[in-house]
Image (spheres, coloured by chain):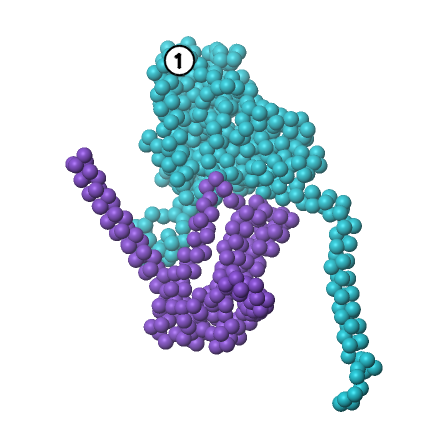
Amino acid sequence: MIAKLKDKQTYVKFIKDFKFAMYCTRHPMDGFWDLTHEKRGSYVVATLILLLTIAARLIWLGWTSFVFVAVNWERINVLTYVASILLPLALFVVGNWALTTLFNGKGKLGQVYIAACYALTPYPLITIPLAIITNGLTDDFASVVGTILTFSLVWCGWLLVTGMMQIHEYTMGGTIICVIATVFAMAVMVFILLLFFSMISQGISYFVSLYKEIMLRVG
Amino acid sequence: MKLRRSNRIKGLVLAGIMCLALVPPVPAKADDGVDVGYTYNYDFWNEVRYSPDAYEVVGVYTAVDLGLETNFKNPDGLFVYGDLVFVCDTGNSRIIQWKKTSEGKFELERIITEVKGTEVTSLSGVTDIFIDQDRNFYIADKGNERVIKTDWDMNVLMLFTKPVENTFDQSLYFLPDKVVADTEGRLYCVSDNINKGIIKYEADGSFSGFYGAMPAQYSWYQYIWKKISSAAQRAALESFVPTEYDNVAIDNEGFIYACSTNVSGSGLNNGSEEGVRRLNLLGKNILIQNGYDYVIGDVVWGNFAGYSGSSLFIDVTAFDDSGIYVCLDKTRGRLFTYDEQGELLFAFGGVGNMDGYFKGPVALEHMGTDLIVLDSIDNSFTVFTPTEYGNLIYQALEEYRRGDYIKSGETWEEVRKINGNYDLAYIGIGRSLKRQKKYKESLKYFKTKWDRKNYSKAFKEYRKEWVEENIAWIFTLLALLIIVPLVRKKIKMIKWEIDTADIFKNSDGGEKK
């Protein structure tokens, strides 16, 4: 590990991978095709982009001028904001992979993860500079800032769709159906998770009360 | 979360009130010497921020207290003219006139039970009275279905009766409830069961039409539902009608304030319905709503002790010259004071038996900055006068209005010392600083209290100043940003040319193509 970190070649490859992620944002059709077929995707870069996205989400809250974003710091929970990205992403990756393995998709779980993370690139790329720039702007620009923010999200969505299309080798129509089905799969997973959680907590509380009862009798 | 919190606070307040009821009535004073009460405001996050009392009770008066033999019976109308107070004692069909002699002292002047010079001289169920600047009375004589215009000595000048025009639905009774008149002598009358707006009469007594009708309220799904249903179904459905007004008042600029309790909570919240409107000559609403919220009274409603839902304004009164107006909420018996810009200055009052609380508030008037509230269930009226704190707020607003920005800033600073939770004090100081061109200092105040509009205005000026001061640096930086890459490119070019130039190449191979 340390030897690898000391090796200059690691960094050269990292920069090359990072540049490739940028290339994917500009040429998604081409880029995501190469991602699987030329094996140019990198877990390190994908995770870095994910972390940057989470950072951008928090930076948007913290650094943006209060004219554009009102944050009630007394009531905010940073972890929910982190989870608001991590949880849907995890659900999407697992749900999408589970579905596409059934329906002739070519992508592997790792590739779905890399593609999904690469698709997030525009968000930090646009949001972080925008957050800083807003401190020099007044409320006249509220709609402009809103539009740019929406644009970044639309771009992310477009990348996600094309990414899925290329790595699973689907047609456009197939991809859209696949994405809708994935959203449905996510909802099912959330439902099962909640069910599971509630059953586990019921079970635990049963044993806890049983233990308490016994201790009361014995004591 | 928010609701629960406000309920808890209200619970505490209730507990506090109960404690107060148990212990002997020692006047409770806060540390700053101001009476402890239930005055509050909302901050940017719609959280209730308690404040020192802005108004204190001078007294609660019944007719017996003020020297009459029979008490009020469901009084409905109130009017103040100079230092005269008129109470329309609806249940007893009389109007009682008092003169305020000194603070908290009222002297009975006369009791009006009939008018002179018309067929039916006695009054029946008078609901409102208005006096114009020529000292003419306008009396809403509801029991006799007429509005009477008289002179000061009750000699009838004119009678306004049910309009005979076709625009007025002839199957309806004419039940004048509230009246005001403008400086031209035109009469505006709110009548029961009329939802087309305020009935307007010209100065000569002729019916001139309806004024300031509220638009009919319906939602998009109701609209679609109506479109697809058959004629029979449509007839069975509730029809979309404009809402009725409940009360009117006129300010000294001649604009009419009208309020309505036929509003829905969701409509108030999204701004599609208004509990109070300020109408211009054409009947258009010109009320300014620049505050954190719309002019809707309580912003967080909760559900406490049987009182739920939005505030419902039953009466409104506008102060002279300052643009400040006060709305009376019948849901929770509260008074909401707004400034010209529609910012909530403070809210106080409530439902209860203590002085300063009401059972069935129906009418509100002002005497200077004093407020008088008529209670139709308690059969009494309550007089409030501003405390030092309330007066400071009014003073600061007035100074700003006059253009005395430095003074206004100082007054707001005093308000802030009394109540550090008062958002408008910070914004007021900021606005004063902004007017004094101290933009950088003002930004801090606006930012503290989330005033985006003023912040943006001040920031624009500050940015301009900053750019003017640092213009040299900005240009240098820009120049560097452009020139450096150009120079670097040039150097690279020269280097490349040198490297690839023929004369420096080994001509050993001689493989030139």
Quadrant where the C terminus of chain B is found in the figure? bottom right
Where residue B387 appears, x then y in whole percent? 53, 20
Quadrant of the image occupied by residue A211: top left
In the figure, residue B120 lies in which quadrant? Answer: top left
Q: Nearer the viewer, residue A115 or B460?
A: A115
Seen from the viewer's position, the closer of residues B492 and B48 is B492
Q: On the picture, is B221 further left or further right than A33?
A: left
Quadrant in which residue B441 is drawn: top right
**Callout 1: SS:** loop
Is B308 drawn above or below residue B18 in the view shown? below
Residue at 40% over, 15% down: B62
Task: Name the residue that disc number 1 marks.
Answer: B25
Residue at x-position 44% and y-position 54% = A84
Q: Position of residue B33 (x, y in %)?
A: 51, 17
* Mark 1: amino acid: Pro
Q: What is the residue that sits farthest to the left in this orientation?
A: A217
Left/right placement of residue A91 relative to residue A25 reads left
Q: Colour of chain B?
A: cyan
Chain A shown in which color?
Answer: purple
Farthest front residue?
A3
State whether residue B22 is above or below residue B433.
above
